[in-house]
Image (cartoon, rainbow, N blue to C red):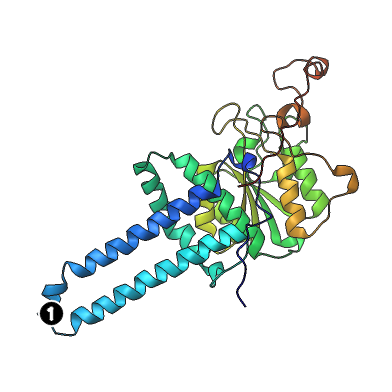
């Protein structure tokens, strides 16, 4: 009995990934696979006559190996595309995610550049697809197996307390997202750490030995972090950079908590049926005014109406 091909009903909203669409990742990974197959085919045709001078069977053996490689690439790409589209594994596609992480992303960025697609767009699409695959491939986790990994730029630049060697040194003054993220850690019993770069992040992962990482970072650091920590699954949450990169960045606490609830199999309370935070709204709603004005002045600003959710792509 054939399995029907239906679109994944649990696709993540594009708004959380700067409008990125899965179709960009699917198109680039398909073109990348086709290019690899073409390179293999050309690599067999060019020396075909010369290989026959070594032994009559050498061209046939080489051709058989290259055909097997091409068939493997086509099988892996087809399974991955179907997995992305339907949200269910096809043809053993759970194992293909590692190939996409290690091999396809750099080639997709190169191909995207040739097609006039920015590296950021490719990474946004990659992170969205990675998150949906991680959600579909992994089950529930114990709180002790989950690590929230944060960048140091979430901490206020005016804070004199160093948190990279001990996040519990935080005074919880409410001037940056760290206070609320620590509250989430305490509420759900998961681990939380702050990293200043890739080397420190890898050291933290080796020390904590998590089975799942919920990482907050920009698209560049998330993409490299997903590659570095494979096969440990990483669910990426993009940060917001109202002051530019690496300075007083923000993060949607709603998205972090939604990820925690999903992977810990915790149902949200009925009282928290609220829409997801819109980009940029986290700073005023959670951490208060950042420019020294009083709360009344910020409260007098008109509230932004919730955006109409669009169909996830």
Of residues 166 and 275, the one drawn nearer to the viewer in this rendering: 275
Name the residue at 50% across, 43% down: 220
Question: Crowding near pointer 1: few (<14 within 10 Å), some, many (20+)?
Answer: few
Q: How far across and how far down the image is residue 207, in percent?
A: 62, 60
Q: Is residue 169 left or right of residue 272?
A: left
Which residue sits furthest left? Answer: 53
Quadrant that contains the N terminus? bottom right
Of residues 91 and 249, the one drawn nearer to the viewer in this rendering: 91
Which residue sits furthest right? Answer: 271
Q: Is residue 170 visible?
A: no
Vertical placement of 128 versus 291: above or below?
Answer: below
Q: Is residue 153 left or right of residue 69?
A: right
Of residues 154 and 196, the one drawn nearer to the viewer in this rendering: 154
Q: Is residue 123 left or right of residue 312?
A: left
Vertical placement of 26 versus 120: above or below?
Answer: below
Examine the image and state in which quarter residue 86 appears.
Answer: bottom right
Q: How far across and how far down the image is residue 264, in percent?
A: 77, 59
Q: How far across and how far down the image is residue 131, in percent?
A: 61, 54
Examine the image and state in which quarter residue 251 appears.
Answer: top right
Q: Is residue 29 visible?
A: yes
**Pointer 1 residue:** 52
Name the residue at 62% across, 67% down: 4
Q: How far across and how far down the image is residue 313, in percent?
A: 60, 47
Examine the image and state in which quarter residue 92 appears.
Answer: bottom right
Dot 1: element: helix
Vertical placement of 297 versus 141: above or below?
Answer: above
């Amino acid at each position: 009995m054939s399995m029907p091909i239906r679109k994944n009903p649990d696709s993540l909203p594009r708004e959380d990934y700067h409008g990125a669409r899965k179709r960009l990742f699917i198109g680039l990974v398909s073109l990348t696979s086709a290019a690899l197959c073409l390179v293999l085919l050309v690599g067999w045709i060019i020396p075909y006559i010369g290989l026959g001078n070594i032994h009559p069977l050498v061209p046939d053996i080489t051709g058989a190996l290259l055909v097997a490689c091409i068939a493997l690439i086509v099988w892996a790409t087809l399974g991955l595309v179907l997995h992305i589209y339907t949200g269910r594994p096809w043809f053993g596609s759970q194992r293909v995610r590692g190939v996409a992480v290690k091999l396809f992303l750099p080639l997709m960025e190169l191909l995207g550049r040739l097609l006039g697609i920015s590296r950021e767009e490719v990474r946004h699409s990659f992170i969205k697809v990675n998150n949906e695959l991680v959600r579909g491939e992994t089950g529930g986790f114990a709180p002790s197996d989950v690590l929230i990994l944060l960048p140091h730029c979430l901490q206020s630049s005016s804070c004199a307390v160093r948190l990279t060697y001990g996040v519990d040194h935080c005074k919880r003054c409410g001037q940056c997202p760290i206070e609320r993220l620590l509250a989430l850690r305490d509420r759900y019993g998961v681990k939380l750490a702050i990293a200043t770069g890739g080397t420190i992040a890898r050291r933290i992962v080796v020390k904590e030995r998590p089975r799942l990482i919920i990482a907050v970072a920009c698209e560049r650091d998330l993409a490299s972090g997903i590659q570095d920590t494979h096969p440990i699954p990483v669910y990426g949450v993009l940060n917001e950079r109202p002051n530019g990169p690496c300075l007083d960045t923000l993060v949607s606490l709603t998205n972090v908590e939604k990820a925690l609830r999903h992977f810990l199999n915790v149902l949200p309370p009925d009282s928290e049926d609220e829409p997801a935070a819109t980009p940029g709204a986290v700073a005023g709603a959670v951490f208060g005014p950042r420019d020294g004005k009083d709360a009344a002045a910020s409260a007098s600003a008109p509230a932004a109406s919730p955006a109409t959710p669009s169909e996830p792509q």
